Amino acid sequence: MIPTPTDPDERAFLDGYDAERFQRPSVTVDVALVTLIDRRLAALLIQRAEPPQKNRWSLPGGFVRMEESLDAAAARVLSAKADVRDVFLEQLFTFGAPRRDPRTRVISVAYYALVPPRASLPESSGGARWFPLEVPWEGEAGGPIDAIGEKEKPLRLAFDHAEMLGLVVKRLRGKLDYADVGYELLPTTFTLRALQDVHETILGRELNKDSFRRRMLATGRLEPTGRRQAGVGHRPAALYRCVPREFS
Amino acid sequence: MIPTPTDPDERAFLDGYDAERFQRPSVTVDVALVTLIDRRLAALLIQRAEPPQKNRWSLPGGFVRMEESLDAAAARVLSAKADVRDVFLEQLFTFGAPRRDPRTRVISVAYYALVPPRASLPESSGGARWFPLEVPWEGEAGGPIDAIGEKEKPLRLAFDHAEMLGLVVKRLRGKLDYADVGYELLPTTFTLRALQDVHETILGRELNKDSFRRRMLATGRLEPTGRRQAGVGHRPAALYRCVPREFS
DNA sequence: TTAATAGTGTCTCTGAGACACTATGTG
DNA sequence: CACATAGTGTCTCAGAGACACTATTAA
């Protein structure tokens, strides 16, 4: 993207450039890994082992290395701390309040990632655990979101991570109708009812069955597999898969 | 937001924390200041006086200082380099490709800002100039956007600033229907036709007059001022103003 | 008077919600 | 068989587009 400078002036400038002249902030990525558990949104959290905010639950995160892109840093964190690879991963927002971390100036680029339910989820690997989320607002109002700990008690998250989770849900609600975020939370084949459950959980409200079904089939993104559910105690639903978007 | 640590453990940790242990990237903000000129979107660009990429046109930008928030850094850059204050300003996306700046690792938080046309715009203050934008894609497809220089020739922007402008337009198109970005590009009073011009320019396509008018009036955000245009060579249109959003 | 745009009334078409009805599995 | 959920057909209603018509100013 950036061409190597061939202009002698540019070369001379770069050779004389002192990268250490100014004080610099630390830059981290924090990744909200989200899935569905028991018809609720849930996020993977890690209990902090060290100060600051020792023992509080937090999103998996880590420092951005000098030679890696932000996307690569987020993927690395997801792989190292949650043992999750090759999933939907998208940049969310950058948090840079001067005192958000008491150690030093830390600017954090927040990401979110989506995985289908029970897809080899590390149930409690390395101190990481899934917690359901409680969304205290409707629509795309926004605002911080608490995770729900033992006995349905809200969990106080570290730093500004509750704000990050709030932005994740706001983004999910906004993108649901025109992006594939709904399918990222489902196995490769699924019923229309399961898709509707995903939408209802993300939106936090019930949807009309008939028009949901029509709307989804009209997108042209659903392909019948020809197979059906089995052993469900009622008429089995047809199984669909999501087909890649048409590039016309 | 972050409480001052009172726990002795936390204090001891912080006192012993060496902020210089790791190599850190530089963090900058780049601000796309956008307005409408002659029914086209336009951005304020600055010609780079120093390498790297000397003489190329670029978005106003600057390093984030240790004690200021990202929003404050963006507002400061806007004030210092474009002499613009108290305008709509929103974070866009963070660009962090490892070699996007040849000097050193630079992570840039991109912002965009909106001003009404000809509102005391610095026409060419301090080397800054307005350039119209050419959007080469429809809808919210996305992709880099060139500025248009002399004789309608596309201008090669510095660094990844064409991608930033692309994201600005994508964001504007996405938010137009449910946020106030349209009104930010208009004077305090305006006609419905002027509002439609703004929407058509942002969307890059013509809109149906009747339904646009109905849709806008139905939002409840438009208040008639009781006054009308004057000296327009045809029936003068009623002037409206945008009323603040209802919080119910 | 004419040109030009503002603004209104009304018809049609499309898509969502509502609801009744049929289909097909398990026990 | 009963029961539960899947899936279909059809009516109604609301909003967008289309279009014809009227209103009001400058030149």
Image (cartoon, coloured by chain):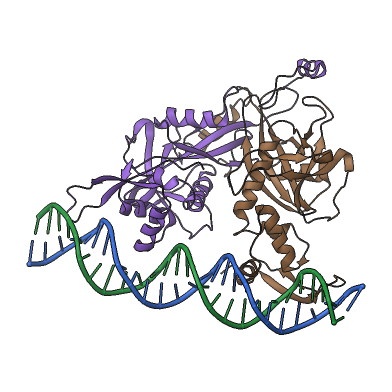
Chain colours: A brown, B purple, C blue, D green
**Is residue A67 visible from the viewing direction of this image?**
no
Residue shown at 64%/23% (left/top)? Answer: A20
Q: Nearer the viewer, residue A205 or B182?
A: A205
Q: Looking at the picture, how far across and down is residue A235, in whole percent?
A: 80, 75
Quick check: B160 left or right of B39?
right
How many discs appear? 0
The correct choice, above or below, for C14 with respect to B205 in the image is: below
Vertical comparison of B30 with A91: above or below: above
Is residue A211 something that shows in the picture? yes
Q: Position of residue A144 (x, y in %)?
A: 66, 38
Residue C17 lies, in percent from the top left, at 58, 65
C3 shown above or below C26: above
Instruction: Say if C21 sits above or below B218 in the image.
Output: below
Residue at the spot 87% in from the left edge and 38% down from the top edge: A127
Q: Residue at x 31, y 54 (%)?
A: B193
Query: Which x, y percent locates residue B213?
Result: 36, 58
Which quadrant is home to the C terminus of chain A?
bottom right
* Residue at horizontal 74 percent and vertical 63 percent from the top: A194
Left or right: where does residue C1 sit relative to residue B144? left
Observer-nearest of A83 and B194: B194
Place residue A167 in its image quadrant: top right
Q: Nearer the viewer, residue A90 or B198?
A: B198
